[in-house]
Image: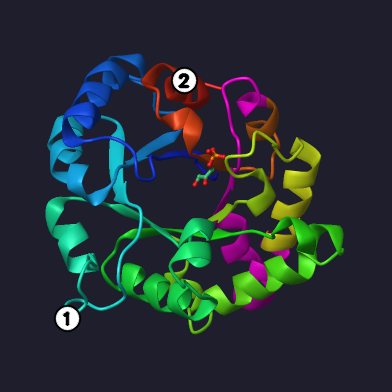
């Protein structure tokens, strides 16, 4: 019922030439693979290279961030209108690196989520606890707070496209993966909070991805958990062979 979504977050890596080379290698590796939805999220400067290169294939393309305004005097930002116009269909919102280094807050995440839905861009909303919060036994509270603030003002009938990515901050780029059990437990908490806010039926349809040191070696044990509906992959998505192995977990 929930089609798994496997997304590559390239972060601030790859020039347009490197992105083009990647796509050329990656396309044949996943040709005809329709069990999972595949999304590549390059940096904005490679969108105009990657989008035409995957046109007509089973691969979609998303941005890594966007502003919540349609346009305006916001130097350095990309608007949802621009993403949509270039052919991006997805956008990552509230990644922990944006929360940590670029002042992204639960409030801006909520504004961006509302804007993405308005423009029919699929929002991949990132949440997750830091190590100190986990060690203090606050994980559930943190996740529930992040989910409820992200979803503020969203109506049940408009929520279906939303994708949540659970990315425990202590597992990002550290090589420390959450065990499948830890991830599944967090996903259950997240889904129950969505159900509290939007109802059980909506919650059961929303995809919750896991992110944090996903690799070809651990992808299947994570993705075979019924509560885990896909992955958001950083480092291991930078190599087309490695990302293709994850897609085909
Ligand atoms: P890594 O896969 O490099 O841990 O990064 C995860 C991530 O931040 C994906 O958005």
Q: Is residue 143 left or right of residue 34?
A: right
- Mark 1 vs mark 2, CA separation in Å: 39 Å
Q: Residue 152 colored magenta?
A: no
Q: Is residue 156 left or right of residue 186?
A: left
Q: Residue at x 38, y 40 (%)?
A: 10
Q: Residue 207 colored magenta?
A: yes
Q: Residue at x 49, y 19 (%)?
A: 245
- Circle 2: element type: helix
| Image location of residue 100, percent across then percent down | 53, 64
Q: Nearer the viewer, residue 161 or 211?
A: 211
| Image location of residue 7, percent across then percent down | 43, 40
Ligand 1 closer than 8 Å to label 1 CB: no
Query: Can residue 185 be spotted in the picture?
Result: yes
For disc 2, the marked residue is 242
| Image location of residue 6, percent across then percent down | 47, 37
Q: Is residue 41 above or below residue 72?
A: above
The quarter of the picture where the C terminus appears is top right
Q: Nearer the viewer, residue 215 or 223?
A: 215
Q: Residue at x 78, y 50 (%)?
A: 185
Question: Which residue in the rendered view is the most extreme toward the bottom?
Answer: 153
Ligand 1 closer than 8 Å to label 2 CB: no
Query: Can residue 199 be spotted in the picture?
Result: no
For disc 1, the marked residue is 72
Q: Quadrant of residue 182?
A: top right
Q: Is residue 11 left or right of residue 88?
A: right
**Numbered range of the magenta stretch:** 191-220
């Amino acid at each position: 019922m929930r089609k798994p979504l496997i997304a590559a977050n390239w972060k601030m890596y790859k020039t347009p030439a490197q992105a083009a080379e990647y796509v050329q290698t990656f396309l044949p590796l996943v040709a005809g693979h329709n069990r999972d939805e595949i999304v590549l999220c390059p940096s904005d400067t490679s969108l105009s290279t990657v989008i035409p290169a995957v046109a007509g294939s089973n691969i979609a393309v998303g941005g890594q961030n966007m502003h919540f305004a349609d346009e305006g005097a916001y130097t350095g930002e990309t608007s949802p209108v621009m993403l949509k116009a270039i052919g991006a269909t997805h956008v990552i919102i509230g990644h922990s690196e944006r929360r940590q280094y670029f002042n992204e807050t639960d409030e801006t995440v909520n504004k961006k989520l509302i804007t993405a839905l308005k423009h029919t861009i699929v929002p991949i909303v990132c949440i997750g606890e830091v190590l100190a919060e986990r060690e203090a036994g606050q994980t559930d509270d943190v996740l529930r707070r992040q989910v409820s603030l992200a979803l503020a003002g969203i109506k049940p009938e408009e929520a279906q496209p939303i994708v949540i990515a659970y990315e425990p901050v202590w597992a990002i780029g550290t090589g420390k993966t959450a065990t499948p059990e830890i991830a599944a437990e967090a996903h259950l908490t997240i889904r129950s909070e969505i159900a509290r806010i939007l109802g059980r039926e909506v919650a059961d349809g929303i995809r919750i991805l896991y992110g944090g040191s996903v690799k070809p070696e651990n992808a299947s044990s994570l993705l075979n958990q019924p509560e885990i509906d896909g992955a958001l992959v950083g480092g291991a998505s930078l190599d087309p062979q490695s990302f293709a192995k994850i897609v085909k977990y």
